[in-house]
Amino acid sequence: MAKKIIVIGSGAAGMSAASAARAADAEAEITVFTEDRDVAYSPCMIPWVLEGKST
C-alpha cells in the first residue's frame, strides 16, 4: 500500500517537502493543501510583477 503524505502550504517550503517526498517514495500519494489560487509562485517576484517588469 502506498504512503499518503499531506503537505500544508504551497510556498517554497511546501513544494520542497512535496518534491523530497516524491524523490523518497515514487509510489506515495502526495496531496498539497493551500488557500492560494496559484501553486508554487515566488513571493520575491511580487514587486516586479506589480511594476510590470516581469515577463
Image (cartoon, grey):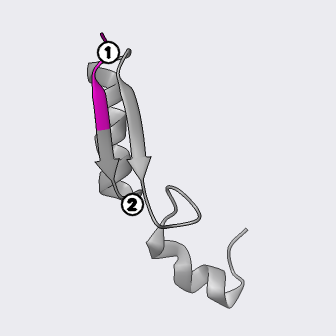
What type is the residue that disc 2 sits on? Gly
Residue 34 locus on image (x, y percent): 43, 60
Q: Residue at x 51, y 67 (%)?
A: 36
**Eye-nearest disc, 1 or 2:** 1
What type is the residue that disc 1 sits on? Ala
Q: Secondary structure at mark 1?
A: loop
Instruction: Tell me if residue 4 is in the magenta stretch.
Output: yes
Which residue lies under the disc numbered 2?
11
Where is 25 relative to 37, above or below? above
**Can you say which quadrant of the picture contains the N terminus?**
top left
Q: Residue at x 31, y 41 (%)?
A: 6
Instruction: Tell me if residue 34 is in the magenta stretch.
Output: no
Q: Residues within 10 Å of mark 1 (few under 14, many from 20)?
A: few
Looking at the image, the residue that sits furthest to the front is 1
Which residue lies under the disc numbered 1?
2
Mark drawn on residue 32:
none
The span picked out in magenta is: 1-5
Where is 5 relative to 7, above or below? above
Residue 40 locus on image (x, y percent): 49, 56
Quarter-wise, where is residue 9 in the image? Answer: bottom left
Q: Residues within 10 Å of mark 2 (few under 14, many from 20)?
A: some
Q: Nearer the viewer, residue 52 or 6?
A: 6
Q: Nearer the viewer, residue 14 or 32?
A: 32
Q: Residue at x 35, y 21 (%)?
A: 28
Where is 52 relative to 39, above or below? below
* Secondary structure mainly formed by the magenta segment: loop
